[in-house]
Image (spheres, rainbow, N blue to C red):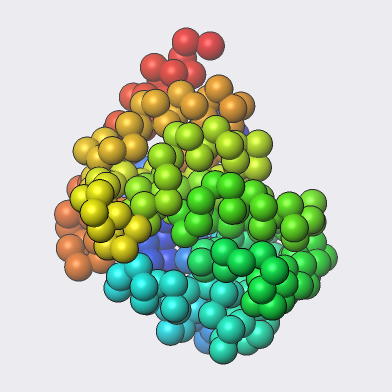
Amino acid sequence: MQRWPIGVFTSIDEGLGVHLDVAQELGIPTVQLHAPSRQLRTEAAADQFLQKCRDAGITVTAVFGGFAGESYADIATTAATVGLVPEATRAARVQEMKEISDFARHLGCDTVALHIGFVPEDTESSSYRDLIDVTRDLLDHVARNQQRLHLETGQETAEHLLRFIADVDRPNLFINFDPANMILYGTGDPLEALEKVGHLVRSVHCKDAKWAPEAVRGVEWGQEVPLGEGDVGIERYLRKLHQLGYEGPLTIEREIPQDRERQKADISHAVRLLTELRERILGAD
Ligand code: MG
C-alpha cells in the first residue's frame, strides 16, 4: 500500500463518523469503522459490509469500539460515561469489546481501537488495578484474533498513557494518536505528546481544534474545527509523523453530525490538504 493512504472515520448505523458512501464519493481508499450496534455485528452483516468495501476499493484499517450510554456532551460527562473506566459498566463493555474484536476479525481487520476512558490518576487505586486486569484480559482475546488494540489519545497526558501501557505490559497494545483531542481535552501540546508516545503510534487521526481559553482549559471543551484551521499545525504534525517513521493511514475525523453537508465539504477539503502535504513531505524523500 502507498505510504500515508488517506482515510476517513466511518460508521454503519448511528455511530460517529460518515457513512461509507461519503468515502466512496470522495475516492478515499481506507476507513476506520465505528463498530455498529450489536444486531449488526453478525457475520452476515460483516460479509455484506466487506463486499461494499471491496466494490468501492476501500480497506478497513481499524474497528473502533463504542458503547451505548457514552456521551461526549462535555468533559465531565465524557469522564463519567466513556470507555472501560466507568466501573458500573466495565465488565459488560469488556465483553462487548471482545465481540467487537470478533466482528473485526470477520472483516479481516487486524486492529481494534477505543477510547478507554479517563484512566484513574491514582495508580494505587483499586479502580486502576482492576482496569489493568480487564485490559489484559481483553488484549489476550484480541491476540487470539491476531489483532492489536490501539488506545485513542486525549483523555490523559502522554506520560500517564505511557505509564498505563507499561503497567498493562502486553505486546499488542498501541496508540491511535489524535492531536486535536489533546487540545480539546486540554491534556497537553499535541506535538510534544507525539514526541513522547511516537514509538507506540500505529494509527492516527487527522483532526484539528482550537484551545479553550486558559482559565477553563481541561474543564470546558476546546472547539473542533476543519483541518488546517486549528491549533494543531497540520504540516508540523505530518512532518513529525514522518520523522518518527510513521507510514500508516492518515484518517480524517470530522465530528459535526448535525450538518452532514458541511461535514462532507470539510472532509473533501481535508483530503485535498493532506494529499498536497503528502506530496510536499514524502515527495522530497
Ligand atoms: Mg479521534
On the picture, is 214 further left or further right than 157? left
- Location of the N terminus by quadrant is top right
Looking at the image, residue 98 lies above or below residue 266: below
Looking at the image, residue 200 lies above or below residue 222: above
Q: Residue at x 65, y 42 (%)?
A: 200
- Residue 112 image offset from top left, x and y in percent: 62, 61
On the picture, is 175 further left or further right than 141? left
On the picture, is 260 further left or further right than 86? left
Q: Quadrant of residue 222 in the image?
A: bottom left
Q: Residue at x 44, y 72 (%)?
A: 79
Residue 257 versus residue 237: which sits nearer the camera?
A: 237
Q: Residue at x 35, y 58 (%)?
A: 218
Looking at the image, residue 123 lies above or below residue 157: below
- Residue 47 image offset from top left, x and y in percent: 60, 69
Q: How many marks?
A: 0
Q: Which quarter holds ligand 1? A: bottom left
Q: Is residue 5 visible?
A: no
Q: Is residue 213 visible?
A: yes
On the picture, is 262 further left or further right than 135? left
Residue 172 versus residue 49: which sits nearer the camera?
A: 172
Q: Residue at x 59, y 53 (%)?
A: 160
- Residue 270 image offset from top left, x and y in percent: 30, 39
Q: Quadrant of residue 274 in the image?
A: top left
- Residue 122 image offset from top left, x and y in percent: 61, 66
Residue 6 versus residue 184: which sits nearer the camera?
A: 184
Name the outermost residue toward the top: 284
